[in-house]
Image (spheres, grey):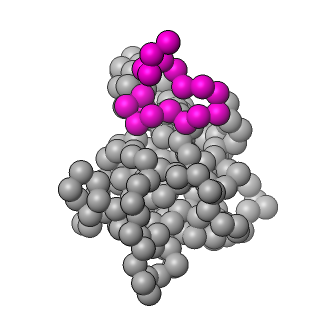
């Protein structure tokens, strides 16, 4: 078995494996049947979240995150990503999740479509999912309004219920 074989259970896929998964998902989505939207699934705390692939630039292991003294709570720090300085946002703080970040290294999800380079710090990456918009359910009525406002809805994936985030509202709501 060489290093390019599938990762062991419980170990998140490497970024190259994610890129291959994205490419194969895009090819699978090309069919005329149901127009599915591809989402990157990721974990923050105990919950699974998803963002549309079209809003993402890349996924990279979180390395050398430089903290900024006096920065707002939702700014985790700055990271050099291939020579570009990216402002890493603390997804846990934006979503008002309790608890400390996991002790693992985590990942940076670099975003596209913003004037400044931004990324989200997440605990782990699950997979890429092709979601049929018809199966997206509204957020539960039991959710606080602040959480529901950042969500497009929920859907079920192998890891459980995945909350689909509205990236624009999430960035604008950063405390």
Image coordinates of residue 96 in percent, x first then y, are: 63, 70
Q: Is residue 173 above or below residue 111?
A: below
Front-most of residues 158 and 46: 46
User: Is 49 on the left or on the right of 88, as rendered?
Assistant: right
Q: Residue at x 44, y 87 (%)?
A: 70
Query: How many numbered marks appear?
Result: 0
Residue farthest to the bottom?
Answer: 70
Front-most of residues 52 and 126: 126
Residue farthest to the left?
Answer: 83
User: Is 62 on the left or on the right of 159, as rendered?
Assistant: left
User: Mainly helix, strand or loop, the magenta region?
Assistant: loop
Residue farthest to the top?
Answer: 1
The range drawn in magenta is: 1-18
Q: Residue at x 42, y 84 (%)?
A: 69
Q: Quadrant of residue 83?
A: bottom left
Front-most of residues 146 and 50: 50
Q: Residue at x 38, y 69 (%)?
A: 66
Q: Quadrant of residue 38?
A: top left
Image coordinates of residue 134 in percent, x first then y, are: 58, 35
- The verdict on residue 11 being magenta is yes
Image coordinates of residue 102 in percent, x first then y, are: 63, 57
Q: Is residue 72 above or below residue 149?
A: below
Residue farthest to the front?
Answer: 2
Q: Residue at x 57, y 70 (%)?
A: 93
- Is residue 28 in view from this perspective? yes
Q: Is residue 148 above or below residue 161?
A: below
């Amino acid at each position: 078995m060489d290093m390019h074989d599938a990762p062991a259970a419980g170990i998140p896929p490497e970024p190259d494996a994610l890129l291959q998964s994205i490419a194969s998902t895009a090819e699978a989505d090309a069919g005329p049947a149901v127009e599915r939207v591809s989402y990157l699934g990721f974990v923050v705390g105990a919950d699974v979240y998803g963002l549309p692939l079209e809003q993402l630039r890349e996924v990279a292991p979180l390395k050398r995150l430089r903290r900024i003294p006096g920065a707002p709570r939702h700014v985790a720090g700055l990271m050099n990503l291939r020579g570009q300085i990216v402002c890493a946002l603390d997804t846990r703080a934006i979503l008002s999740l309790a608890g400390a970040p996991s002790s693992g290294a985590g990942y940076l999800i670099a975003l596209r479509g913003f004037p400044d380079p931004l990324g989200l710090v997440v605990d782990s990456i699950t997979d890429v999912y092709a979601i049929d918009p018809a199966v997206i359910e509204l957020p539960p009525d039991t959710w606080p309004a602040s959480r529901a406002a950042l969500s497009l809805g929920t859907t079920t994936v192998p890891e459980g219920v995945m909350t689909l985030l509205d990236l624009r509202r999430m960035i604008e709501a950063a405390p």
